[in-house]
């Protein structure tokens, strides 16, 4: 199982068929084993197969069924955290290099689509950053001046090209792009298998060992994968208890998609300036309709359970700007990891020689995933990796005031979570739960994650996350338990859906 087994469906999921090799049923050996089969994992596999490496990819659930299937796939070299903030943290040269990494990722996706005949609807489009409030114009001025200074191609427009809504003065970013992420993953997977790689779904990682320049990966079923190197490309690193997790925060984001008449909305990427900003794109349906996809309403994972209000707010915001938007056909959520210093973590895992990680995608999941894959594949192959210093996972976080404030907020979230150990449960007893509901219940000294199934049966597990001990919270949209600390997610019965946890919630301790 992975996050494909959460309840909501994105607009990509029904169309994503990815060929694979079935569950791993024996020990295997390869040059590189990759844990995670989303954009970073399959892109890394692709780049390594191109270099003649033998590759094995494993995933705890369906291949391509993790958080990549829940993105909206904006391919942006514009930065959602703003280059003006990035410069404050990392300086101009690094900010320029980061822009190049994102532009290189878009170029690479375009080249792979052409080389692999990928039917993935890749298209170059413009991107528009517009003010959410008139007061935000000063932020736009600062961002524009910074981009111009860095040599990033930007221009001013009087308004984003939204026919029925004057957004006010807007920055236009040239050469952004969009893609169908499911079909793109399918093309990568096809090419990896064609090049001799193997993809094993439903093959969960439970442990690793690095000795004598070799890495051994242990799977839940007890099989071992022997490799010269391993790459962890899971949404939140499953091989790590501390190092990376203190430098990023898990956030849930929400998206809706509904039809608009084809051609009625300019094919572009749109973002506003809210902190939990709105993001908009089109997906052609190939008939007289396009799909308009709108996201936003982010919050820290596990700290809200008012998803209907969030979807209603997204719908209201969309109709004000795009009155032709029909009924939402899709409503879903996904998780992003926000790094404290705005930059992803791609490279050698701190303390290892032959184990690599990719995480911290922020709102740039597809481009960061591909830039990370280019970096890790180059490092493994002993080639120059121009973005390696930028993405170095062991870097000490440097912060600007806003990023530090976000980080402190994140740490307070973790501290608040531990304080919950002492408080009462969310409901007094399981009798208060209707079918399909979950809640935390106190039983003596213990907190239990209790779920009542539609048929009335109860599942009772410990509410203590098996990664590092925070208390999980019920997510009524996705019908899962979310851990606010580092982003683990568990099925109603406690099975792991998303790391960093690798073990299910423990059986309830009889008191
Ligand atoms: Fe780390 Fe739950 S994800 S404690």
Image (cartoon, rainbow, N blue to C red):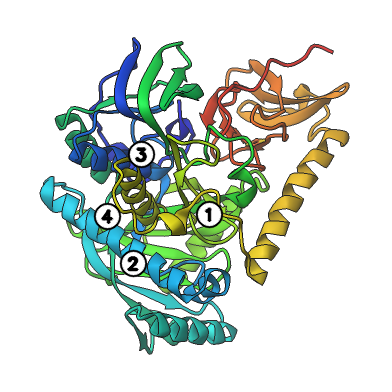
The circle on residue 311 is 1
The circle on residue 100 is 2
Q: Of the residues tagged 2 and 1, which is closer to the observer?
A: 2
> Quick one: label 4 or label 3, which is nearer the N terminus?
3
Q: Find the distance from the CA under tag 1 to the CA under tag 3.
A: 30 Å
> Quick one: label 2 or label 1, which is nearer the N terminus?
2
Q: Of the residues tagged 4 and 3, which is closer to the observer?
A: 3
The relative height of residue 5 versus residue 95 in the rendered view (above or below) is above
> Quick one: label 2 or label 4, which is nearer the N terminus?
2
The relative height of residue 122 versus residue 352 in the rendered view (above or below) is below
**SS of the residue under disc 2:** helix
Q: Residues within 10 Å of mark 1 (few under 14, many from 20)?
A: many
Task: Give coordinates of residue 215: x percent, y percent.
Answer: 42, 25
> In which quadrant of the rendered image does the N terminus lie?
top left
Q: Of the residues tagged 1 and 4, which is closer to the observer?
A: 4
| Residue matched to label 4 | 179
Q: Find the distance from the CA under tag 2 to the CA under tag 1.
A: 35 Å
| Residue matched to label 3 | 41
């Amino acid at each position: 199982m992975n996050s494909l087994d959460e309840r909501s469906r994105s607009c990509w999921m029904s169309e994503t068929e990815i060929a694979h090799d079935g569950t791993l049923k024996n020990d295997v050996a390869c040059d590189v084993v990759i844990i995670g089969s989303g954009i970073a994992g399959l892109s890394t596999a692709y780049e390594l197969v191109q270099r003649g490496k033998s590759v094995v990819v494993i995933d705890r659930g369906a291949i391509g069924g993790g958080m990549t299937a829940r993105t909206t796939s904006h391919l942006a070299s514009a930065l959602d955290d703003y280059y003006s903030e990035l410069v404050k943290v990392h300086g101009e040269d690094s900010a320029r290099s980061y822009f190049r990494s994102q532009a290189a990722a878009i170029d690479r996706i375009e080249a792979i689509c052409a080389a692999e005949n990928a039917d993935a609807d890749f298209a170059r489009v413009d991107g528009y950053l517009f003010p959410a409030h008139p007061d935000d114009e000063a932020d736009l001025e600062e961002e524009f001046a910074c981009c111009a200074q860095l040599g990033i191609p930007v221009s001013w427009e009087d308004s984003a090209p939204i026919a029925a809504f004057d957004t006010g003065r807007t920055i236009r970013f040239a050469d952004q792009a969009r893609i169908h992420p499911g079909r793109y993953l399918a093309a990568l997977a096809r090419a990896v298998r064609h090049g001799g790689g193997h993809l094993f779904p439903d093959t969960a990682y439970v442990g690793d060992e690095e000795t004598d320049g070799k890495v051994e990966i242990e799977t839940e079923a007890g099989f071992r994968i022997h490799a010269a190197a391993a790459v962890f490309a899971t949404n939140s690193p499953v091989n790590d208890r501390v190092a990376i997790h203190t430098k990023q925060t898990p956030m849930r984001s929400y998206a809706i998609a509904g039809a608009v008449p084809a051609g009625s909305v300019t094919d572009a990427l749109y973002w506003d300036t809210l902190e939990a900003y709105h993001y908009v794109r089109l997906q052609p349906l190939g008939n007289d309709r396009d799909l308009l996809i709108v996201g936003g309403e982010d919050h820290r994972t596990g700290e809200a359970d008012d998803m209907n209000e969030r979807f209603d707010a997204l719908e209201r915001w969309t109709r004000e700007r795009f009155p032709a938007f029909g009924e939402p056909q899709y409503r879903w959520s996904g998780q992003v990891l926000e790094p404290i210093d705005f930059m992803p973590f791609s490279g050698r895992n701190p303390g290892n020689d032959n184990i690599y990680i990719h995480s911290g995608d922020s709102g740039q999941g597809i481009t960061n995933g591909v830039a990370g894959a280019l970096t890790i594949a180059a490092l493994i192959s002993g080639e120059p990796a121009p973005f390696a210093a930028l993405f170095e996972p062991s870097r000490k976080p440097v912060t600007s005031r806003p990023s530090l404030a976000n980080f402190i907020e994140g740490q307070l979230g973790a501290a608040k979570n531990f304080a919950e150990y002492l408080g009462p449960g969310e409901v007094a007893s399981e009798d208060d739960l209707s079918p399909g509901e979950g809640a935390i219940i106190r039983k003596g000294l213990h907190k239990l994650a209790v779920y009542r199934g539609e048929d009335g049966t109860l599942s009772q597990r410990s509410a203590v996350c098996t990664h590092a001990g925070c208390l999980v919270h019920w997510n009524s949209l996705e019908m899962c338990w979310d851990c606010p600390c580092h982003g683990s997610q568990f099925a109603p019965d406690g099975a792991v859906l998303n790391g960093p946890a690798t073990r299910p919630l423990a059986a309830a301790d009889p008191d």
